[in-house]
Amino acid sequence: MKNAIKFIAFVGLMLAGSSSVAQMSKKNEKVVIKTNIYCDHCKECPSCGKSLQSNLLKMKGVKMYELDDKKMTLTVYYNGQKTNADAIRRSISEMGYDADDIKALPEAYEKLDDCCKKA
């Protein structure tokens, strides 16, 4: 009888744990954003690349990102309970880069290195 109670308690704990894991996974989201990357070294660029990295990762909820300079996209992984795709797009535009339909802020674009601007 005691073993049956322990087994039922164990199964109950396992079910409760699995539902909380399912809820946690709903927090994690990703967005692929089309951007404007004109230089071939933005990932390593000491000014623009590091600025993009530090500013994106400073955003509340952003966990990581991947820059594909060939496709001109940023894939951003974030916590959907702390931020959203539109806020990420606005932040990217404030850094001087287009983000889907949101154009780069002109004053931020002018601060980019010449190699990162469209020729």
Image (tube, rainbow, N blue to C red):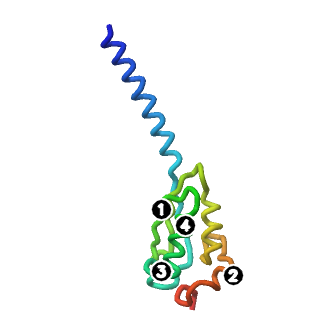
Quarter holding the C terminus is bottom right
Q: Residue 56 carries which label?
A: 4
Q: Which amino acid does label 3 sit on?
A: Cys
Q: What residue type is labelled 1?
A: Met
How packed mark 3 is, by other alpha carbons closer than 10 Å (few <14, some 14-19, many 20 or more), is some
Q: Is mark 3 on a helix, strand or loop?
A: loop
Q: Mark 2 points at which residue?
A: 106
75 relative to 1, above or below:
below
Comes first in the chain, label 2 or label 1: 1
Report the side of 110 relative to 78 (left or right).
Answer: right
Q: Is mark 2 on a helix, strand or loop?
A: helix
User: Looking at the image, which is closer to me, 55 or 14?
Assistant: 55
Question: Residue 89: x percent and y percent?
Answer: 62, 66
User: Which quadrant holds residue 2?
Assistant: top left
How packed mark 4 is, by other alpha carbons closer than 10 Å (few <14, some 14-19, many 20 or more), is many
Report if the CB atoms under discs 4 and 3 are less than 8 Å apart.
no
Question: Residue 75: x percent and y percent?
Answer: 49, 65
Q: What element carries label 1?
A: strand
Report the side of 90 relative to 68 (left or right).
Answer: right
Comes first in the chain, label 4 or label 3: 3
How packed mark 2 is, by other alpha carbons closer than 10 Å (few <14, some 14-19, many 20 or more), is few
Q: Mark 1 points at which residue?
A: 64
Separation of disc 4 and disc 1 at Cα?
8 Å
The residue sitting at 65% across, 73% down in the picture is: 94
Separation of disc 4 and disc 3 at Cα?
14 Å
Quarter holding the N terminus is top left
The residue sitting at 65% across, 76% down in the picture is: 104
Separation of disc 3 and disc 2 at Cα?
19 Å
The residue sitting at 61% across, 75% down in the picture is: 95
Report if the CB atoms under discs 2 and 1 are less than 8 Å apart.
no
Q: Mark 4, mark 3: which one is toward the viewer?
A: 4
